Structure formats: structure tokens, C-alpha cells
Image (spheres, rainbow, N blue to C red):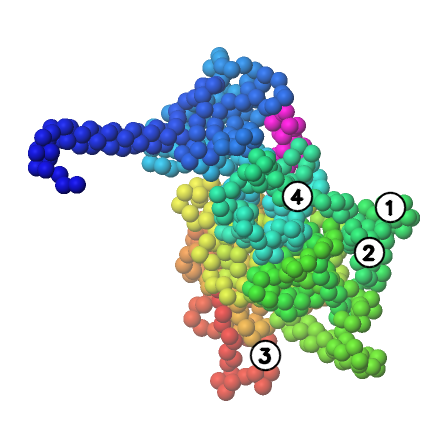
Amino acid sequence: MRCSTNTVIKNPLKVLLGMCLQLLWSSLALIIIAMFAAAQDSTSTFQSIKDGETIVSTGGTFELGFFTPEGASVNRYVGIWYKKISVKTVVWVANRDTPLTDSSGVLQVTNSGILVLVNQSKTAVWSSNISTTAQNIPVAQLLDSGNLVVKDGNETFLWQSFDYPSDTLLPGMKLGWNKITGFKRYLTSWKSTQDPSQGNYTYELDTRGYGEEILKTGSVVVFRTGPWNGIRFSGLPHLSPNSIFKYNLVFDDHDEDYYITELLGSIYSRLSLNPDGRVQRYTWIVSTQTWGFLYQTQIDNCDNYAFCGPNGACNIDNSPVCDCLKGFKPKTPKDWGVVDWSNGCVRKTPLNCSGGDLFQRYSGLKLPSTEQSWFNRSINLTKCKMVCLKNCSCTAYANLDIRNGGSGCLLWFGNLIDIRNLTVFGLESQDIYIRMAASELDNTVINSKASESKKVRIILCGTLLSTGLLILGISLAFYCRKNQRQIYWKMRSSKKEDMELPSKEEDLELPSKQEDLELPLFDLATVVYATNNFSENSKLGEGGFGFVFKGMLKDGQEIAVKRLSKHSSQGLDDLDFFIFDERRSFLLDWPKRFDIINGIALGILYLHQDSRLRVIHRDLKAANILLDSEFNPKISDFGLARSFGGNETTAETNKVVGTYGYMSPEYAIDGFYSIKSDVFSFGCFDVGDNKWEEKQRILSCRPQTQPAWTCMESTHRMQQNPQDRPSMSAAVLMLGGEGALPQPQKPGFYGERDLTELQVRSSSECSVNELTSSLFEPR
């Protein structure tokens, strides 16, 4: 049909009006949509809400408001729950231990940024805890992750609910701790399904050893996940990669260690610590409108912590379920007869630390508790085995990470606690190698081929063992000759025993056990435990050969531990800041400084004279003196110390190590050292020019009633010749004003040399100039 021109021109106003109305409706619709979107966003932020009002996250996933638990009394709580789920599931509670008894509560944000819940009388019944004050007008916002945050005007978070979990771990929430501040994030169960107050159970990342999660009732561990192996926790084989969520353990990070999960799709999933102590993961099933059970951590009795005792293994498919590891036997057989396995197992044959121990490989186990453990990410399994063999306290080793064929090293010390057999079909297994006497080891471990004869096996074993003993003997001889890594500690105990201290990660030469020393060494497990695994929070400073850490033994005694490093240079953060820092130096007046000096002198005297073994420190300096809370001095850093037996008083070395400005001239030039070397270093504590020519002014600068060394500005005059220096016993008397000051002779490094007091070296070591050269390596 054709349209005539009359039809087109007949109603032009009507057509124009229709077009305008259509444009108007379209514009109005856009405005309404924009207003609705803005309103939806504004509902997620607030400065105050009353009971009966709610706040919804931007995406509508979570809702915040007041609630009463189902089946409970009239108590009112502020909480967060899923908005789009028909079953009301609360994931966080603010005032869980201080409920309101009526509906008069108001949740508001103060001008300083504190979230406060007040009752009808305006009394605060709960508030958030913040360390900073808002610079702008703060607001609270419920994020679509379920995190309630208080923000400054510049979007800075002043506080967040994710830092204070209740009984639920949501995706994006950290379960762990800050190693610098010590702040922990952990789950706490409800007391019951009707009472959200804190219950008996907590679920947290264990801070005592390598990363694993533990469930506790009070302070007692009732379950643990096993250590992280790069893919999952070794005791949770059902926690495998899936399409619902991914998970990771961030461990040995500079600031934080934590476990975290992330959803992989538009699905709801949560980990919950139930009032009965079960840790379970749930996923929302849309078709049935119910929470579907995905997995739980505790399955059977074998998951009960240490169910079979030390060195025992639990297998739920056996009867009885508990058995001893190979090479072990029940500690109390009578108790095992009445199914009481709590005392565990002991070795059938004692270990032989001199080289007669081998390792039994196990697969498909939940690895032991890492409370007494040590780890290193950089070394391989072969080096890991060697490190374990060299330490008499090491009982097992394994790869730290099982990915890509395995990497890193995890060592256990002492008893092996909480082992169970696991079914890990289709999953990559983690092997553990448990130390035992060679006589207890399964022949198949050392037999390279099943068809080899017994004679060949014996010859092979004997050859390997002899070679190992030879290498170990050579290593021990080399170690004793180069004895520059031992760290001695004086213990207030009648027990005299020596264990080795660990060196740094890249230099793991651990000496064997030594007997009957008055200054014992600590084993690796003790040192790791005392320093919280050499955490950054325990670090005191850095010296010439590594970092220094503060630690505390189980008996409460404080210690300082130096972790040796052959790659370390002179520390940038030394420990002598009290003396030379312009602000802190005011804390030390002259009487306090004199007490410190006197205490150092007494400590050196003990090392030189009163100890069973005479010890020469060789690196005395201000940075190696630690002060406790009452400024009592402690001599530290015995990494370069040498010990003498009997009547030995002197020695020499071809490798000179120490610190510029503190070395005696005979040691720096000729490698000759004695107790007088420490005396020289002790006299160098005051930095200044040598004033030996001004001896008359030195002797007359003090009244007769003052101690001899009160004229510290003029006492930097240590003598060049060791025989001219006083012994430490004489120095102590001088400090007490009981001894006469000797006439000062030429100071050290005065320009010429006097070698008459030095021992004559053998002709094979002398040059044509009758001088020798030592490797000078100060730090």
C-alpha cells in the first residue's frame, strides 16, 4: 500500500508529541535506574544503625543488623549473615560475649573511627579496637566479601571484621598471625547453637613450628592438620585442588604467615568451627536450598592428637589401631594390653651418632607434629639427609614441598608425635625418612637389587659405612682445627652436656656431640624453639658473621643466639646503640657506665681464669655486649672464641678474623693471640687517641678515692707488648680502686714492632725477611 502525502502531513503534531513522550520515558527510566543503583550502593555504608534496620552489601551477598539466635532467649546481637540464602546463616558476631537484653541498641561510628554498640542508656557494650585516629569523617561499610570495615575519607581501612573472626572462615579472610606485631587471627566456636559467646574450641595456625593448623580446647591441642607440603596439609588428603575454591598457605613471609581461600565461581562456601569442636566446610546447594557438607577435618579416632603416643602410628584399618614405628617398641607394654597407648614407644636399639644410623622411608603418612622442627627452602633432599645425620637430635627428615619432584628440607627433633596412616589414592605422596639404628633397618632399603646375594649386601653396607666413618672422621678433624663456629653458653645447671648450634641456612656444618664441657652447646631444636624459628620479631641485630636473635629457654632463661653466615658482611644494625646513640646515651650516666665496664671485666675474668676451660673471646667490642632491662652486661657472640685446656694460655692462627680497631697488634700482624688479646680489646672500648705520652696527667686526674678507670677519656692506652698489659684479674682490682695503675708503655700500632715476646715460628713458615704473613680477615 502506498502512503499519500496527505497522510504524512495530516497529523505532524501528534507524531512529534509521540516522539517527545518516548524520549521523556526513556530519560526517566535511565534516571530511575541510576537512582536505584546509587541507593543500592549507599545502603552498604552507614554512620549509625538502630535495631530493626539493616545494611546490605553492594552486591547483595551479605546483610548486617541485629538478630536473636534461633531458639534462643531475647538476647540481641549485631551480626553479619548471608542475604540471598533462605536459611539464616550468621558468619560474624560483634558483641558475642556482651548481648543486649532489649531492642534499644544502636551501632554507630565515632568521629575518631571507632565502631561502638550502645544500649538504651548510651553505655557502650562493645567497641572496635583501632590504633590510629581518622583524619576525615569516617564511615562503616559492609563489603560484598562479608567484611565490615571502618574507612577514613581517603578509603583507608581503620578497622575490619576480618581481623576478628568468630566461628567462620570466609573466602579472603586470613587465618594466621603477624610476625612483627604478634597479632593473631583465629576461629573461636560458639558456646552452643543458641549462644554465640566464645566456646571451648579455637582453630588457628600453629606458630610453634612449620606451617600447620591446630584445633585446641583451652590450651590443649586435640587435632592438627599436619604440615603444609606445597599442595595441601599432609594430614588432609581430601583437601585437594577442586573447582569450588582454591587455597594457599603463605608461610615464612617477611611480615605474616597465614592460610587463605578464594572462591572460583559464583557459589557460597564457608569453613566453620562448630560448638562440638568439628571443623567442617559447607557449600550452598541451590536446588535443595540447604548447606551441603563438603568435608571435615576430624574423621575418626586416629585424628585425635597423639592418639598412639610418641613414636607410635595410628591405622584405623588395623586392630588394634596403634602400633610402633619400625625400630621402636611399646614403652609400657602393660598399658598397651589395656588399649592405653598414650605413653607411646621407645627405641629398641639406641642411635649411634658416630655414623651407624640409617633411615627408613615411609609413604602415605600424616607427618609428625612440627613443634620441634627446622626447615630450609633452598637445600635438596640429599643435603637434608646429611644435615640430619650430623645432628644427634635429628630424628627424621622430608622434603618441604612435594611439587615438581620435591624441594626444600624439613627436619624433626626428639620424639615423633601424632602420626597416622592415610589413604591417598591418586594423590602425590610425601615421603618421610625416619632415623634408626642400622641393625633395625629393613634390608630392602640398602639393597639395590633384590637378586643380590647376602654377601654382596654385607660388603656393600660395610664399604659404605667405612667410607662414611672415614669422611666423618676427616670432617671432625677439620672442624676441630677450624674451631671457629662453636657458640658456648653458660648454663645455671649441674648437668654438663654439649649439643651443637645450627649455622645459617647456606652453611650447615653441624658438629658432633662433645662431652664434659662446662660451657655446653644447645641442640638445634632447643635454639629453634627459643627463638621462635629465628623469627624477625626475635632479631636483635646483625654482626659480622650473621644475625643475632633473642630467645628464651623453657626454664625462662633468656639467651642470645647468633646464626652464623659465611656470606654475611659487617652488620649495618649493630648492638652498640646505647653507648653511641645521641639520644639513648643519656640513659647511661657515668656510674651506670662504670657498672657495665666492671661487669664486662668480671665476665672476661671468668672466661680467662674461673672456667674449667680457658676461653679467649677474640672479638670483644661494644657491639657484642648485650644489656638486659636493668643494664646488666652480658658478653655475647662467641663465634670466634677459642678454648684451651690445662695450662694453655697462647696460640696462633693462619687466618686472622675479628673487628677493626679492637685487634691486638700481635694478633692482627702475626696471628698470635692469648688472654692478653682480650685485655687489649677491653681497653679499646673507649674510642680516642693514644695518650701514652701523657701518663702523668692520667695518673693525677683522679682523687685517690675514685676507681682507677674513672678517667675514661684518657685510658685508651693499651700496650703494644702483651707482657706490659695487666691480666683481667689485675684490671678488676684496678677498677675497684685496689690496684696501682702501671706506668704506660708504647701503645699498640705505635709504628715499630717488638716481636721478642712472640713464639718463634718454624723455619718452614718463615720468609727470607724473617716475617710471616697471615690472612687478615677482619669484620
Say which of 227 and 382 sits in front.
Answer: 227
**Quick one: SS at disc 3?**
loop
Residue 254 point in image, percent of width and height: 49, 51
Extent of the magenta region: 183-204
Q: Which residue is depicted at the point 80% across and 52% down? A: 317
Number of the label disc, if any, that sits on residue 760: 3
Say the numbered circle drawn on residue 324: 2
Q: Where does the image place residue 536, in percent across and percent down from the top left?
A: 52, 50
Which numbered disc, 1 or 4, marks the residue that appears first in the sequence?
4
Q: Position of residue 741 (x, y in %)?
A: 53, 55
The residue under label 4 is which amino acid type?
Gln
Q: CA distance from mark 4 to mark 2?
A: 27 Å
- Amino acid on which disc 3 is placed: Val
Q: Quadrant of residue 138?
A: top left
Q: Residue furthest front?
A: 1
Q: Is residue 300 visible?
A: yes
Q: Earlier in the sequence, mark 4 or mark 2?
A: 4
Q: Nearer the viewer, mark 1 or mark 4?
A: 4
Disc 1 to disc 4, C-alpha distance: 26 Å
Residue 296 circle label: 4
**Of helix, strand and loop, which one carries label 2?**
strand
Q: Secondary structure at mark 4?
A: strand
Q: Secondary structure at mark 1?
A: loop
Q: Which callout, 3 or 4, points to the residue nearer the camera?
A: 4
